[in-house]
Amino acid sequence: MSSVRAAIVVGTAGAAVTGLLWWGSADLTAGDPDHRAARFVPRDGTHAVVVTDDGQVTSEEHARLNGLESLLSTPTVVSVAVSEAVGEASASMRIWRQTTTWYDHEAAGGPEQGTSILAVDDRGVLGLASYGSFTLTYDPPFVELPADVHPGSEWSGEGTAGSGIDYRYELAAGDSDAGDDCLNVTGELALSRDGEEFFTNDVDEDWCEGRGIVSAEAGEVPGLDLDTEPLRPEPTVAEAADWSTGRLPLRIAERVGAPFATDSLFATEGPPVPGPDGGLVLASSTTRDLAAFVRRDDALVRQAVGHPGGEPTALGAAGDVAVVGTTTKRAVAYGSLGERLWTVELPDVLLTAPFGADDEHLVLATASGDVVVVDPATGEERWDDTVADQVTARPAYDDGLLVVVDVAGTVKAWDLAAGEVRWESEVPGAVAVAVVGDRVVVHGLGTVQALDAGSGDRLWSTAVDGAAPQGLGAIGDTVVVDTGEDTLALAVGDGAERWRRPSADQTLVLGELVVQARGHRVVALDADAEQVGSWPIDDDLSAPVSLVATETGVWATDVSSRVVEVGP
C-alpha cells in the first residue's frame, strides 16, 4: 500500500509494510498497457499478509477489474467522483483495486476494511480514490508511477481530493535493495484545506514487479477465535405458523450519507449462504468478489469484500467461515469481516459447495472426483481420497459417517474423523444423498434407494419418475424427495410411499418442515403433507427462485441477489 493511500485508508493503524505472503506472479496482466509501470501492478487475486509499522496484521487483496465492474462495486460518492474525474473513459479503464482488512480491527483503531481504487493507462499507474476511515477522490488522478518509470525518474502533481481538500506530491524513483525488479520511490505527499496543510507524509517505499509495494519478511495469519459450527436449522411446525415475509434489499454503505439500494447489481454465482447474526455472504459473478452483508434494520448492508481471484464456481460456509471455490482450482476462506483466512490448492475446480460436516471438518469435492477434507479454521488438510468421477451433489453427514456420490453412480462412505473408507457401493445416476439414522438414502436414475449405513448393503429400492432432483431430506422416519416430477414421502424402513404432491421449483427439508418454492410463493408442509403456511414473494424475483436455510427461517433469492425473508 502506498504512503498516500495508507494514510487515508488505514487512519490511526499505520501501514508501513514489514511482512508479506504473496499469491501471484510478475507477468503483465492481459490488456494492460505495455509499459514499465504496469509491470508493478499485482495480478488479479494476489494476496499478502501484512504487518504494519505498529504491529497490526492485515490481509491485503488485489483485484483487477474493468471500469464498469469497479464502479458497480463502490459507494456512490466514489463512483460518481471517479466518473467526473476521468470522464467517458471510466467505464473501460483498467482498474487495480486494493483492499486492506484488519484481523483485529478494534485494536488497530480503523474500520474493518479500507479500499484504494487505481487505474492503469498510458500515463502509468494512477490513484483515483481511497475510502475507509473517510473518503478521498482525486481530480486529476495522482500519478503513483509514470509509464516510463526508472531509476532517476522524478514527477509531481497537485489537485483536489473532494470535501474541500487539496493535494500535492513530489516523488522520485531510485534503485531498491529489495531486488533487481524493484524500485525505491521517495518524496512527499501533502493534504491541505483552505491553503493550510493539515497532513504531510514522507514517502519511502519499495515497488516490485507483480507485487506492488513490498518488504522482505513474511507475515502470518494470526490465530483467531472462529465459530466453525455448521448451520443445522430445525424449525418446528409451531414456529412456522408465526412466519411472515418481507423484502431484504442489499445495500452498499456510504461513508457520507445513508446507504443506497443496489438490488440489481450483484449477479451471483449460485445462491448465497447465511453469515453471522442474520447476515448474508454471496459470490458475485459481476465483480468476481465475495461480498459479506450484515443486518441493519430491514436491509442487508455490505460490510466486507473479498477477492479470491478467478471466477467463483461454488460457495459454502462453516459457521462464520465462508469458503469459495474458483476457476483457479483453489478454495479460499474468509472470516466475517472479509479477512482472508487460508487458501488451499486443489487438483480441480469445485462444482458443489464446500460442505461443513462438523466444526472440525470441511469437505471439498472436485470436478475430477477428489475428496479433500480440511480444518475449516486453518485450511490444514485432515485427509484426502477420491471417487470415480466428478462430484456435483452435496455430500451428506451424520453421526461420524461422511457419504459422497459422483456422476458415475459411486456411493462412498468414510469415517469422517479417521478418513478411513467404511464401504463403497453404486447407485446408477446418483444425484442426491442423505444420511437418515442407520440408512443412507440415495436418489438415483429412476429410483430412490436405501443402503445400510454400516455396510452399504442395499435395503430397498423404490421406482420414481423424474430426473431433475429438487431436494432430498428426512423428517423423522419419513424420507422426502422431490424428483422434478413429484414430491414424494417414503418410509425410511421399507421405501413405501406415504404421500405424493406436485414437484416444486426447490424443496428443503428443515426440522419438522418441508419448505418449497412454488412460483412466487414459499409453502411449508408438515410430515403428513398438511400445509403449515404459504407466503407470497416479490414478483420481480427472477425464476428460478432458490431457497436458503437460515437460523430462523428461509430466504428466497434469485440470480440478481434479490432476497425475500420468510421467518419470524
Image (spheres, rainbow, N blue to C red):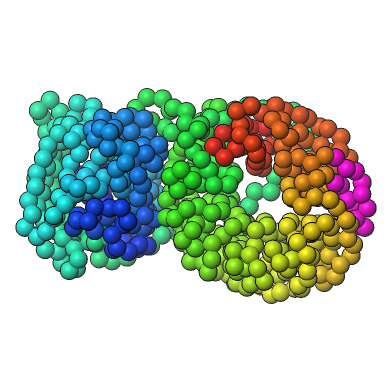
Task: Give percent across and percent down for residue 336.
Answer: 49, 47
Q: Is residue 414 left or right of residue 314?
A: right
Closest to the observer: 307 or 398? 307
Q: Residue at x 15, y 28 (%)?
A: 193
Q: Residue at x 12, y 37 (%)?
A: 158
On the image, which quarter does residue 505 sit in?
Answer: top right
Compared to residue 318, the image places residue 523 above or below, namely above
**Residue numbers of the magenta segment:** 488-501
Residue 499 inside the magenta-drawn segment: yes
Task: Give percent across and percent down for residue 201.
Answer: 15, 44
Q: Is residue 325 left or right of residue 188?
A: right
Res 108 seen here: no
Q: Is residue 99 left or right of residue 409?
A: left
Closest to the observer: 103 or 179? 179
Res 147 seen here: yes
Q: Residue at x 63, y 52 (%)?
A: 230
- Which SS does the magenta portion mostly show? strand
